[in-house]
Image (tube, rainbow, N blue to C red):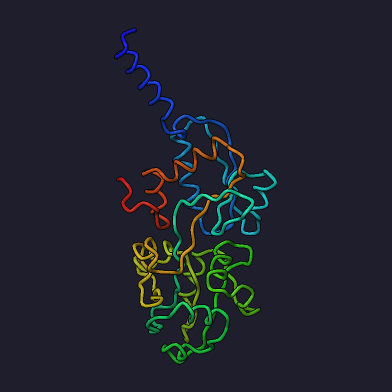
Amino acid sequence: MHPRISGFVCAALLCLIGSPAWAEVNGSMVITGNGPEQRMMESLARAFEKANPRAYLDILWDDNSKPIEMVKAKQAQIAVTGTEEKTLQSFQIGWDGMAIMVHQSNFTKEVTTKEVGELFSGKFRMWADLGGPDTKVLLIDRPRNQNNRDAFEQQLGISGKIPEGTKVIAKDEKVIKTIAGTLPPLSAVAYVSMGQALEAVASGVPVRLLPVDKVEPETPTVRDGRYSLRRPVLLLSNKEPDPLVEAFQQFALSDGGQKIISEFYTPLTKKPSP
């Protein structure tokens, strides 16, 4: 064979070998979680299956499940969380801003990170203490086993400090409806995933998001870290190599995957391809 032709053949073979792993994979995999990421993961899974007809992804979501323990026991291949686990591999696919949501009529201008921690620790009983209306503060918390609560408490250094008896609501949608529907004194406050929160504001729901440390809660400020209340959206898996897990991880970082993620959270890429 002519040396130049041989070179072309070798190059072609290398291209085939180096093609994206997620384009030609098969098998089944279980993805589990208990936080607010369910809709995003279902969309990602269906898009991945469409690109890989011989792959099947089962999404197991339960508010009371223990995703990390399921992965450790090999009952699932991926756990979706907001915090790392040292015995597992962590793979970030996006950011989730944690918005501080109040009723639209609450004219509290802004809060600091320290004040958010003190607010959810029960230090402030009246909104007037934060420059707001002369009404009582009604805290809304999230379930203890959900990763959004874990990340929120850890970042603010308030683990175990949220008052006992605080109203607990699991789903972001219900949290938003509760805040919007609270009758006078319109005092409810909660932390909500940024994507859901911004969607509610844009659609005219009577709620607003408080600036934190003089930074507006928006996608660009979450991405570059100016808005500090954020948690990574992580895929946790066992450290042993798994082609299907690796293919899904790379798919989530692809332009198509990041575009899907941007519909729910803040993507890692600056400008996903259309």
Image quarter where the N terminus lies is top left
- Image quadrant where residue 28 sits: top right
- Measuring 45% from the left and 73% from the top, which residue is drawn there? 100
Looking at the rendering, which quadrant does residue 105 occupy?
Answer: bottom left
Residue 163 at x, y = what percent?
A: 62, 80
Residue at the front extreme, as displayed: 3
Count of numbered badges drawn on the protein: 0
Q: Is residue 98 above or below residue 57?
A: below
- Please name whichever residue, 121 or 18, is drawn nearer the observer in this view of the structure: 18
Residue 255 drawn at (x, y percent) = 36, 44
Say which residue appears at 51% left-offset and 69% top-offset. Answer: 175
**In the rendered image, the vertical position of residue 16 relative to residue 206, given as above or below:** above
Identified at 55% across, 52% down, the residue is 80
Q: Position of residue 86 (x, y in %)?
A: 62, 54
At 58% across and 37% down in the image, what residue appears?
Answer: 241
For the C terminus, give its image quadrant. Answer: top left
Asked if residue 101 is positioned above or below residue 38 in the image, the reply reads: below
Measured as percent of width and height from the top left, residue 44 is found at: 46, 45
Q: Is residue 4 above or below residue 31?
A: above
* 131 relative position to 90: left or right: left
Depth order, front residue of 138/113: 113
Q: Is residue 257 left or right of residue 273?
A: right
Q: Which residue is situated farthest in the top direction here?
A: 1
Q: Is residue 128 left or right of residue 146?
A: left
